[in-house]
Amino acid sequence: MDIIFALLGIVLSGFIIWRSTDGFELASDFLGRRLTKGIKGATINAIASSMPEFLSTLFFLFYLRKSDGFSGGLGITAGSAIFNILIIPFSIFVVVRLTNKNAIITLVRQTMVRDGIALIIITGLLAILINHGRLNWVDGMLLTAPYLIYIAWLFISHKKIIGKGENYRYSPLTAKIAVEDYLLINLEKFVLKGKSIGTANAWRLLSFSTLVMIIGTWLLVYSTDELGKAMDIPLIFISVILASAASSIPDTMISIRDARKGNYEDAFSNALGSNIFDISFALGFPLLLYTIFFGSISMDQQILDASFDIWFALLIITIGTMLIFITGNQFNTTKAIALALLYIGFLVFIYFEIILNINFLNPDTPDNIMDYFRLN
């Protein structure tokens, strides 16, 4: 019964995060309307859509504390990163082809190379830091710094940062609020109230969306922790699959929206930029804050081994994905299937990681799923 309630909590948290995405999406789209393509996707869209990972890592660390909390943050960040670079492009391909079978999804190689190099460097840095086994504020600062450098490089390397924002269009919804608006948490209606969007109410909408997302991510962290306890499986393995998928909903929605508009550069750069933000800032800054207030974190050896394996796998998958992206200027069926197969392979890898970490489990009772398979 505890497992069922925990799973329901994760599903509900995913729904809440998904509904808060609409507000984030609308507000960030307006506030970043004048940024040029590639810049907007890798900055405003990436930060807005990656808030669940940032908030989840904060909650994991300050709620569970020390090694367990950081392993939850590592799991949700790694899982989200893999989801972003594999499932989001695959979802973009499926949605675009369902809408228009003859659509050609173009890739801007310069953007792919730019974000890919930054992502590989940051992922490799984290794998090295994790392998040390003890993390402090210096490690938090080392992780946070690359994202700030990446943002500076992004703005310096682009000749044109600000455009005219001529393509932005918004049609206000009716001010009348129906029952389904409450059930679906329609923040656009609640905040804008049928008015056209402007700077003031865009920031207000962003603030309310953040509040709703905080509620959703807290529920996600709590439910993930409870599911790990109920199944007697290390938190990192629960968060790397289930929690990460729930937290990646905003990234997926924003990328799909951009792709349906034909803005493929922002659609793909959002997925890659979100990973850079997740690994560097969303993981590094909470680590920096926590270690300043509570001291360094010593990783349990078993969690350390599992964390390093997962992050090394992420590094390999990231390199492989970048090679797929920069081969040719189109994202076609072959590439989409290759990414889907990589994700299936990652799920198989996680399954065997759990089996290899069997000493986390209670050896005497088959009261959880992994014990059942092991003993039977």
Image (spheres, helix red, strand yellow):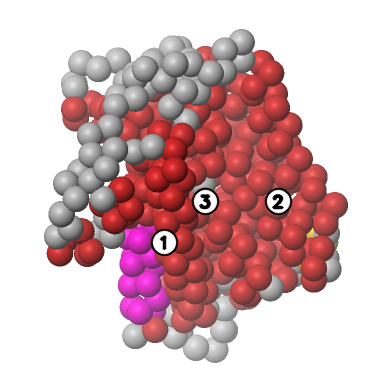
Q: Is residue 183 above or below residue 101?
A: below
- Check if residue 108 falls in the magenta segment: no
- Residue at 68 percent across and 30 percent down: it is 150
Marks 3 and 2: which is nearer the front?
3
SS label for mark 2: helix
Kind of residue indicated by mark 3: Met
Can residue 82 be seen here? The reply is no
Kind of residue indicated by mark 1: Val
- Residue at 57 percent across and 12 percent down: it is 160
Relative to the observer, which residue lies in front, 300 or 147?
147
Residue receiving disc 1: 212
Q: What is the spatial separation of the Cα atoms under label 2 and label 1, in whole angstroms?
A: 23 Å
| Snapshot quadrant of residue 113 | top right
Q: Is residue 366 above or below residue 223?
A: below
Question: Magenta span: helix, strand or loop, mainly?
Answer: helix
Residue receiving disc 3: 51
Residue receiving disc 2: 284
| Marked residue nearer the N-terminal end (3 or 1) | 3
Residue 82 horizontal/vertical position (percent): 51, 44
Label 1: how many Cα within 10 Å (few below 14, some 14–19, many 20+) = some
Left or right: where does residue 329 sit relative to residue 184? right
Q: What is the spatial separation of the Cα atoms under label 3 and label 1, in whole angstroms?
A: 11 Å
Q: What is the spatial separation of the Cα atoms under label 3 and label 2, in whole angstroms?
A: 14 Å
Q: Is residue 312 above or below residue 236?
A: above
SS label for mark 3: helix
| Marked residue nearer the N-terminal end (3 or 2) | 3
Marks 2 and 1: which is nearer the front?
1
The quadrant of the rendering that contains the C terminus is bottom left
Left or right: where does residue 326 sit relative to residue 128? left
Residue 80 is marked as: none
Q: In this picture, which residue range is highlighted in magenta?
A: 3-17
